[in-house]
């Protein structure tokens, strides 16, 4: 068991990992070894103290070098659930991993593509955020897959192997999935609808009938990851010390609310890590 598990490899998560390391605490950080697609795509960063007109790629390269020097490894597994237990947290990943820690820092960012109406309401009733967790439930059935990133295409392929029919709704360019049972719909869904369970996904006045819907995002909502977590206006509700309503669970960065800026995220990651160190005492 480690002292802390950090979910997210953006600047908030990296800041938290570096501070915990400096405080002599053990930590695991889950995310992408590429760190942050959002940062990498930034043309120019002009408002970060000490870095003048650095490109997104340059910033990411500097962060990778700093992590290497600190001997901090990123675990490239996607977290599917965080479970608050009596004296610890259990963290499950889509790859089948199960990890334990004394505390958790949520630094999972926010998704730039807005939520679909009905997405939260039907979660667990036909809507899933994890292909490998729930795909087997739809063997031989018709599903829709809303995907925000090309990096998640392997999950679409996995679902296409299971389902009879897949309506793919990509929010990115350069789709490479070519399957006889996959039909691409290039429209933004307006609503996920049904009775007790999902029955259709709507595109304005049009709709397609489905048995279930997978919403694959780079940034999974903290409310989906952590049961019982207090949210406010779509963000994690935190106190000044970055603590949440769950004992031992902290949050930092864009997932806590605006402004969505690197300096703010780095500061919150640092505060969250110091708060974890105090909590562990």
Image (tube, rainbow, N blue to C red):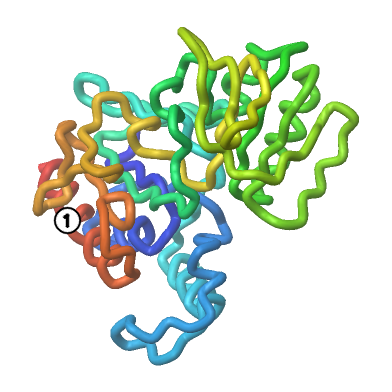
Residue with the mark numbered 1: 274
Compare residues 230 and 281 and report the one nearer the observer. Answer: 230
Residue at the bottom extreme of this rendering: 52
- Residue 69 seen in the figure: yes
Compare residues 186 and 83 and report the one nearer the observer. Answer: 186
At horizontal 47% and vertical 31% (from top left) the residue drawn is: 80
Q: Position of residue 233 (x, y in %)?
A: 25, 44
Say which element carries label 1: helix
CA neighbours of label 1 inside 10 A, class few (<14), some (14 to 19), many (20+): some
State left or right for residue 195 relative to residue 96. Answer: left
Q: Quadrant of the N terminus?
A: top left
State left or right for residue 222 relative to residue 155. Answer: left
At horizontal 40% and vertical 28% (from top left) the residue drawn is: 120
At horizontal 73% and vertical 13% (from top left) the residue drawn is: 141
- Residue 100 seen in the figure: no
State left or right for residue 112 relative to residue 149. Answer: left
Q: Position of residue 269 (x, y in %)?
A: 27, 58
Residue at the right extreme of this rendering: 180
User: As displayed, is residue 208 above or below residue 74?
Assistant: above
Residue at the front extreme of this rendering: 205
Q: Quadrant of the C terminus?
A: top left
Q: Position of residue 273 (x, y in %)?
A: 22, 54
User: As displayed, is residue 161 above or below residue 22?
Assistant: above
At horizontal 39% and vertical 45% (from top left) the residue drawn is: 7
Compare residues 201 and 133 and report the one nearer the observer. Answer: 201
State left or right for residue 39 relative to residue 140. Answer: left
Residue 12, located in which quarter of the rendered image?
bottom left
User: As displayed, is residue 36 above or below residue 120?
Assistant: below
Total numbered badges shown on the rendered structure? 1
Q: Position of residue 176 (x, y in %)?
A: 81, 48
């Amino acid at each position: 068991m480690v002292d802390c598990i950090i979910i997210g490899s953006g600047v908030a998560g990296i800041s938290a990992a570096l501070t915990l390391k400096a405080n002599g605490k053990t930590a695991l950080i889950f995310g992408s070894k590429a760190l942050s697609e959002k940062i990498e795509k930034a043309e120019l960063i002009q408002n970060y103290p000490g870095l003048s007109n650095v490109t997104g790629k340059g910033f990411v390269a500097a962060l990778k070098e700093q992590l290497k020097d600190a001997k901090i490894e990123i675990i490239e597994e996607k977290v599917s659930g965080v479970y608050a237990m009596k004296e610890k947290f259990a963290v499950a990943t889509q790859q089948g991993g199960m990890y334990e820690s004394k505390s958790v820092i949520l630094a999972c960012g926010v998704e730039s593509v807005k939520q679909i109406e009905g997405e939260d309401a039907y979660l667990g009733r036909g809507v899933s955020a994890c292909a490998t967790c729930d795909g087997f439930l739809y063997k031989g059935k018709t599903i829709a897959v809303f995907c925000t990133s090309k990096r998640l295409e392997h999950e679409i392929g996995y679902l296409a192997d299971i389902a009879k029919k897949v309506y793919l709704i990509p929010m990115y360019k350069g789709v490479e999935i070519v399957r006889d049972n996959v039909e691409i719909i290039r429209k933004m869904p307006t609503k996920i609808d049904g009775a007790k369970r999902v029955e259709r996904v709507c595109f304005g006045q049009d709709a397609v009938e489905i048995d279930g819907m997978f919403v694959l995002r780079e940034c999974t909502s903290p409310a989906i990851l952590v049961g019982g977590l207090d949210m406010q206006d779509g963000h994690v509700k935190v106190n000044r010390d970055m603590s949440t309503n769950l004992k031992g669970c902290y949050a930092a960065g864009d997932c806590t609310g605006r402004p969505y800026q690197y300096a703010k995220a780095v500061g919150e990651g640092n505060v969250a890590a110091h708060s974890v160190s105090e909590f562990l005492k």
